[in-house]
Image (spheres, rainbow, N blue to C red):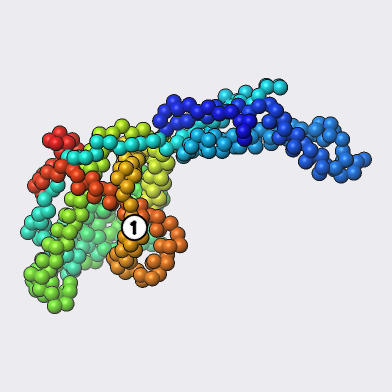
Amino acid sequence: MSDFQFSVESPEPWLRVVKVTIPRSEYDRQYQQRLTQAVRGHVRPGFRKGKTPKPIVEKEVGGRLRAETFEALVPQAYRAAVIEHGLMPITEPALENLSFEEDQDLSFDLRVEVRPEVTAGNYEGLAVQERAVDVTDAEVDEVIERLRESRAFFERADRPAQEGDQVVLDLAPRQEDGSLDQEKALEGQKLILGDERNLPAFNQALAGVEAGQEREIEVEYPQEYPNEAMAGRTVTFVCKIGVVEQKVLPEVNDAFAAQLEEGQTLLELRGKIREGLQAEAKRRTAQELDEQILDRLIERNEVPVPPSMVESWLRSGVQDLQQRARQMGRQPGEEELAQYREAARPVAERQIKGLFLLESVRQQEEIEVSEEEIAEKIAAVAAENGFDLEKYREYVQKGEEKDRLRHGLEERKTYDFLLSRAQVEPVAADAEISPQAAEDQG
């Protein structure tokens, strides 16, 4: 590749334009090599294999050979330029400004996005606010109430149905001629009156019903209803009420606590709930500190973001959105996807900037993860998830899991390094932490 001539321009920190000139003599040399090979394998009536005169072969396949020569030279030149100039491309090259006149040198440009060179600076003394971990009795009570709700049961109520009651009913839709469609009739359907998941018409029509009564309910299904067969339709249902049941919540006492764990008292249950809430509050506080560290770091450093990385991030998010929608029985429209992309773009740019800056800090401070630390992490993950340690260790060694664990540990140690040198201001548990407030106070 010594005959190739390169120059590299950087119109953007994330963009390189490789300007390539290939002497005509190099092109002709490679073309002649292909032509000679073609002659050796050419078969034509009246000539033995490989004995067809070169001009005849060239007339037949010369156009194809010229195209193949050009198509081979472009990647050769690209690889040579990447090596010579130490490029780190993150996209495939785009060919531009091709010039290939008769008897002239071949020249063209290759535009390629690269990972920009980012050097984090001014990362000492980042100002952050640390929220106090404070679990109140009211928060413990909220968990107790959720546990009561999860163990609630229903019993017959000889009265009109009220919000929160369970109504057991049979229903059948009317057909266009007014008759009931027995094939679509449903028996023993249970509906919690007032539940927001119900269609409003059912909540309104069934309020105050009693066992044995019959109600006709006209239901207008919205256009965006998940079941496409019902979307936009109006259907009349005949509902026969079987029974009205009221919710019964268990009393909060030692017996209730023992139902959750044998031998457990209510005092012990409340203590475990408090410990769990405190652990969750600590986790949220730690995550909040990481987010502030990242914001302060980005505020103090200009970071160029390659468009292709943003687009890749957004494509992945769109795919996740579409998958979640399909699981819910719907397909997001173009407008919804466009709104997602617009809202997610700043998030993608922030994540990519943070990736570059954290990596720069890690390299500057020579933060590394040892094999012992990885082994400890493997053991911790196995214990937390109930994995067999030896099988999980074997799984980690075979695939990409080890790299993922290493990256996670490197990132955690980098955050810890920055936090150890940050200006940390303690604030109340219920304090509002503004994205700018901590830095301004610093």
Which residue matches tag 1?
370
Q: Secondary structure at mark 1?
A: loop
Q: Residue at x 17, y 72 (%)?
A: 260
- Quadrant of image for the C terminus: top left
The residue lying at 36 percent from left, 71 percent from top is 388
Quadrant into which the N terminus falls: top right
How far from the left and from the top, in percent, is residue 50?
A: 85, 42
Residue under the point 24% across and 64% down: 168
Q: Is residue 75 above or below residue 265?
A: above
Rendering quarter of residue 161: bottom left
User: On the rendered structure, is 9 left or right of 157?
Assistant: right
In the picture provided, is 417 more to the left or to the right than 3? left
Image-based side of 320 in relation to 166, left or right: right
Q: Can you give x and y, in whole percent of width and height, for residue 243 in the image?
A: 21, 66
Q: Quadrant of residue 272?
A: bottom left
Closer-to-camera residue (324/311): 311
Asked if residue 125 can be seen in this view, the reply is yes
In the rendered image, the vertical position of residue 147 relative to residue 106, given as above or below: below
Three-letter code, disc 1? Ser
- The x and y percentages for residue 148 are 15, 65
Q: Residue 329 in the image: x percent, y percent?
A: 39, 52
Q: Residue furthest right?
A: 46
Q: Is residue 338 visible?
A: no
